Amino acid sequence: MLERLAVILAAGQGKRMKSKLYKVLHPVCGKPMVGHVLDTVREIGVSRSVVVVGHGAEAVQSYLGPSAEYALQAEQLGTGHAVKQAKDLLGQEQGTTIVICGDTPLITAETLEGLVQLHESRGAAATILTAELDDPKGYGRVIRDTSGAVLKIVEQKDCSPEEDAVREINTGTYCFDNAKLFAALDKVTNANAQQEYYLTDVIGILHGEGEQVEAYLTDDVSESIGVNDRVALSVAEGYMRERIVRKHMLNGVTVIDPSSTYIGSDVVIGSDTVLYPNTWLHGHTQIGEDCVIGPQAEIQNTIIHSGATVKHSVLNEAEVGSSTSVGPFAYLRPGAKLGEHVKIGDFVEVKNATIGDHSKVSHLSYVGDAKVGTNVNIGCGAITVNYDGYNKSITEIEDDAFIGSNVNLIAPIKIGKGAYVVAGSTVTHAVPDNDLAIARPRQENKAGYADKIRARAKAKKKRSE
């Protein structure tokens, strides 16, 4: 098997995006476009990937990091000129080189594999990924001879009337024999309407030298979409979202309303999980089997184990144990880790805290910077007071403890095993195992005093009028 290489073109300015964010870093289904492209070429076994950067080079390199090599196109003089910048890195290699644009996130690994296999099986010098469009305006046309062999590619602005009528377009993705690619690039000139060095001219040069040029026609026109503005970005988002949701449904996930369900490209979901409408799954979220997610759930970079339920809640960088329920209207912040059979109820916030198996925080509570054991009950309105304005401190609640309603636990503090903290207490000292803690003033009733309070209030209101 020939070595597979890739050149990813990511040097253009992207002026039509009208954005401060560099074009290829605009996300589609939660991942920057150039990230999709790099992942796809890796999936088909590319051993070296060179990303050609220009405008926004530092931002692209910061995102991709050491996962790619980089070549700088300091001045944008066309696609041929861009690919030539990779010569110092790849010029001496032998094998098959894929050239692909960093703003084409919809191309699949299956299509690229088909392109490469056709290219290598035919012994071609170049193979073009093509598509047929009803309206090919703006795309370069693939020109064939009467026998169907590829002669050249002509850019839209350089088309004759006959060439302009051709519906088969160049998607901007190619396979080349690596050595022949860089040899032909040395012969490309800028004698065209744009005065640029076109990569497409390599096709005509190779054909003129008697080399074999092939074309691989994709049956999915959406893969040809290159994103140059916000309209195309939205179109690409729609196609990819539909593709991702369909993949999960075919893998055994029930999606009640695909049109209102948003799943990121890196999300993993187990079979027999049900997603209800208006569910958003982002980042590297992993969801097990037999879960119920939604409606109205937004989940990012979170692990949810099998059998869990999340409704009307927001989860970010958290972990939810099996058979645990979250919500409605709960908020799990980074570092929240729930055990098995835990209940997190309505208007509960958990941050940087572990909560052990079979424990309950049923409603209107905040648990932050805490270690909660198993079979603990935290009552309505209870709060771990973790911040003094300068420092975060830890609250520890051991197994089988009971925390009453409207309790304030002033950290750092430890509540022992089986301890009981009475409702309404503000606790500042450790509670030993099985002790009862009461930290509130004794109730005092003043006979008839309510009428005096009301009279004062009425008099004050009358004076103000």
Image (cartoon, helix red, strand yellow):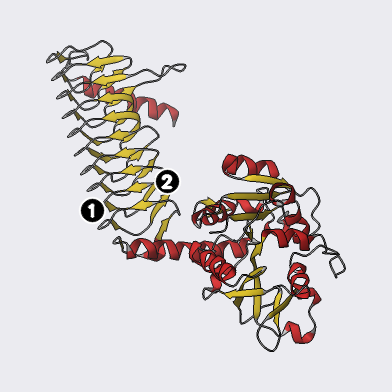
Position of residue 344 measured from the top left corner of the image (x, y, whole percent): 25, 38
What residue is shown at x 21% (from left), y 28% (from top)?
405
**Does residue 34 sit above or below 184 in this rendering?**
above
Q: Nearer the viewer, residue 262 or 171?
A: 171
Q: Quadrant of residue 78?
A: bottom right
**Badge number at residue 290:** 1
User: Type of residue at label 2?
Assistant: His
Q: Classify residue 180 as left or right of residue 416.
A: right
**Does residue 349 sit above or below 310 in this rendering?**
above
- Identify the element where label 1 is drawn: loop
Position of residue 426 measured from the top left corner of the image (x, y, whole percent): 26, 17
Position of residue 203 measured from the top left corner of the image (x, y, whole percent): 73, 71
Q: Which residue is mark 2?
A: 284
What residue is shown at x 64% (from left), y 44% (from top)?
69
What residue is shown at x 57% (from left), y 43% (from top)?
67
Position of residue 173 measured from the top left corner of the image (x, y, whole percent): 63, 65
Tell me if I can see residue 56 in this picture: no
Decide: few, some or many residues near mark 1? Use Cα within 10 Å; few <14, some 14-19, many ≥20. many
Q: Classify residue 209 as left or right of residue 32.
A: right
User: Type of residue at label 1?
Assistant: Asp
- Identify the element where label 2 is drawn: loop
Q: How many marks?
A: 2
Decide: few, some or many residues near mark 2? Use Cα within 10 Å; few <14, some 14-19, many ≥20. some
Picture quarter with the C terminus: top left
- Give me the C-alpha separation between circle 2 and circle 1: 19 Å
Q: Nearer the viewer, residue 338 or 265?
A: 265
